[in-house]
Amino acid sequence: MSIQAKGYAAFDAPVAEGGAPAHADGQGCHAGAEEMQRAAKAAGNSALLERLGRDYPRGPHDQPQSMCPAFGSLRVGLRMRRTATVLSGSACCVYGLTFTSHFYGARRSVGYVPFNSETLVTGKLFEDIREAVFKLADPALYDAIVVINLCVPTASGVPLRLLPREIEGVRIIGIDVPGFGVPTHAEAKDVLAGAMLEFARQEAMTGPVAAPRAGVSQRPTVALVGEIFPADPVSIGMLLEPMGLAAGPTVPTREWRELYAALDCPVVAGLHPFYRSVFRQFDAAGRPVIGSAPVGHDGTAAWLAAIGEASGVPRAQIAAAQNKALPGIKAALAATPIKGRITVSGYEGSELLVARLLVESGADVRSVGTACPRTEWSAADEAWLADHGIHVNYRASLEQDLAAVEEFQPDLAIGTTPLVQAAKQKGTPALYFTNLISARPLMGAAGAGSLAQVVNAAMANRERFDRMREFFEGVGEGDTAGVWQEEPVMHPGFRASQSRKLARKGLSEGDF
Ligand code: SF4
């Protein structure tokens, strides 16, 4: 049986009817991380879980609170030229991931190898995946095929490491990206980018590799790590130019050969601080990684100094680069002030940088929450924010971000979809971090004024929110929202008797 639908490239994979339930089949986000981890360990994936635990330490919540984390890996694969991406997971997960990728304009098929209980436990699923990559591996079309194990195949130990390393020159990259081991979609980008970089590093160590499409840079380059706004590498290149340096490729890359060019950079700018496995590969290649980013006046001054020193640039040249860039940034910040109290939260990993820029623009930032973990590469930004009296809450849960909005009563709340919805419901202007803040330049002089426009426009909307609240006052909410106009009739006696029955079985309502 195979799935054929727009946006799917399905492979013929036989599916037996009515197979016996496997230990991890039929489970997913709703099964709970502990249950899935237990199954993964029983399936021989203890070492994988330990590595994921080290790279992506967990926080107050042990379940993904945003979209399925695997979307990060899928997106990285879909954005690369000559790269095919194949998912191995439950059909509902694959449906959601495929839907999201097309919602974000993937314009590329997502491969899927379906399974059922029987093919999962008998090892047939692995054979089906193997067959699928052999069918796909056409060197005229692809440089690489990425196979992503989602929760259930990871918990069942489907051994992607046993796939051939290359077929006809097409690289096969198999990765496990379970929601019970990789907490955010940001970190899932790191899983695939790190796996690709490791592969490319080993290739570069064994012989000559392809040069960048635009040729080798005449100046030493700085590799940029993090999915940044397309104009930001240009701004960074202009900042580096007085030091005799140039901006290198951005990791995650858009093409396989850019991985070699990134590894060829003497210094790495860790613009987004959660790319632990990517940084490990650069470290193995002997490339120092510099944290933070050229945001605002102070951030740019410190970043240019750190990059210049790590590259062996003379002090006078570093000063020349600072003197060229900083007055323009200061002027842009002064010309576009932001006045108002703001709370910042998100799961992109750039929350600290955005908060710095807001503070330098004059905003009264009260709290910064990020779903990403603290790493050594976020230390400089955290210290700068602490100096300005701002606490950073790493691995912040949605509940903590909502509590910050409740406590500080901001003029603007920046955050994830559920936070934005909750803030707007209270009449507080709010902006979605991913679509409205991440989609703007942040670096150098271009970044200095870019947030003010959208932030000031949103804060000016408070009166409109008040009018809307007034207009909808009295319209039902909770049980009486939408078409439901009457309060449901409660039967407390029935509820109490059910609770007693559950208690006798050692269960409670919360177990369902
Ligand atoms: S793959 Fe994603 S959607 Fe599916 S069970 Fe895991 S976390 Fe949930």
Image: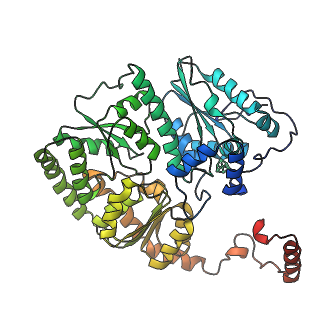
Residue 214 in percent (x, y) is at 32, 26
> Going by the image, does 508 lie left or right of 438?
right
**Residue 506 pos. (x, y %):** 83, 70
Q: Residue at x 38, y 40 (%)?
A: 283
At a point 47% along the width and 39% down the height, the residue shown is: 194
In percent of width and height, residue 190 lies at 48, 44
Q: Please state, as top left, top right, bottom left or bottom right, where the C terminus lies in the image.
A: bottom right
The residue furthest left is 316
Location of residue 495 with respect to 158 vertically, above or below: below
Identity of the residue drawn at 30% across and 64% down: 384
Quarter location, residue 207: top left
Does 127 appear above or below 362?
Answer: above
**Compared with residue 3, is residue 298 higher up or lower down, i.e. above or below?**
below
* 292, 231: nearer the viewer: 292
Residue 235 appearing in the image = yes
Quadrant that contains the N terminus: top right
User: In front: 460, or 489?
Assistant: 489
Which quarter of the picture shows residue 329?
bottom left
Which residue is situated farthest in the bottom direction here? 493
Is residue 358 in view from this perspective?
no
Give the image location of residue 429, x and y in percent: 46, 70
Instruction: Give the quadrant of residue 110.
Output: top right
Q: Nearer the viewer, residue 2 or 279?
A: 279
Q: Is residue 485 above or below residue 201?
A: below
